[in-house]
Amino acid sequence: KDPRIPGRFQCGDELYSDNRLDRGHLARRADLLWGDLTEAEQANKDSFFFTNITPQLEDFNQSARKGVWGRIEDAVFADVDVEDLRVSVFGGPVFQANDRIYRGVPLPREYWKIVAFVEDGQLQGRAFLLTQNLNQLEALELDEFRVFQVAVREIQERTRLVFPENLRNADTFTAPESLQARDPLDRPGDIRW
């Protein structure tokens, strides 16, 4: 657990034993290792605190699934001319009043990610929402998780976080009103940069 945050605000190994939950990193360890050696070493250690871990179904979290979620940042570099190879990624859970409570902990059904970068001198922002079915946590078969491209404004509405106006305006993505009317992303090539 992160010693900088009171333990009562964190869940640890007790949440992840004898079930299909994985310790999902919000920020990938490899993405945090920059700066001088001292900064990179500290970031490496910090990435493994439970404050950077969230409960995710094993099928969602396992890299062997080769899902779009974990490859979004890589797709930016493959499909966009990113200036100075700098990308900022923000992400976290979307908490809802009806989240399933498991071992005293609300399990988010949705996670969000916003990728910001500069292309041709212009700030660009793209937002993504991942849904996971937690209704059958103990079952052998689980519904697939799905990743949708959404607008930054939708993430703001769902999370009640406030993002800077320039980031909201940098996202030109438009989508149907409901997730049910949208097609999930099957591969990074489906992303509209």
Image: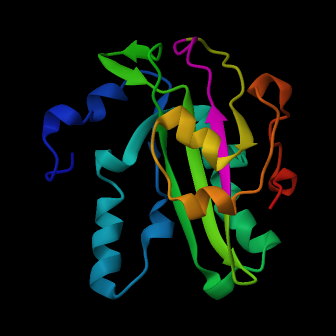
Left or right of 38? Residue 71 is right
- The quarter of the image holding the C terminus is bottom right
Q: Is residue 132 magenta?
A: yes
Q: Residue at x 71, y 43 (%)?
A: 150
- The quarter of the image holding the N terminus is top left
Q: Residue at x 30, y 45 (%)?
A: 50
Residue 13 position (above or below residue 98): below
Q: Percent position (x, y) of residue 22? A: 47, 36
Residue 88 position (above or below residue 113): below
Q: Nearer the viewer, residue 32 or 85?
A: 85
Left or right of 89? Residue 35 is left
Left or right of 155? Residue 72 is right
Q: Which residue is drawn at 50% across and 68% down?
A: 31
Residue 88 sits in quarter: bottom right
Residue 164 position (above or below residue 91): below
Left or right of 181? Residue 127 is left
Q: Percent position (x, y) of residue 37? A: 32, 86
Q: Does the magenta stretch include residue 185?
A: no
Q: Percent position (x, y) of residue 57? A: 55, 30
Q: Which of 128 and 17 is in front in this view?
A: 128
Q: Percent position (x, y) of residue 76? A: 72, 67
Q: What is the span of residues highlighted in magenta in the rendered image?
A: 126-138
Q: Is residue 53 visible?
A: yes
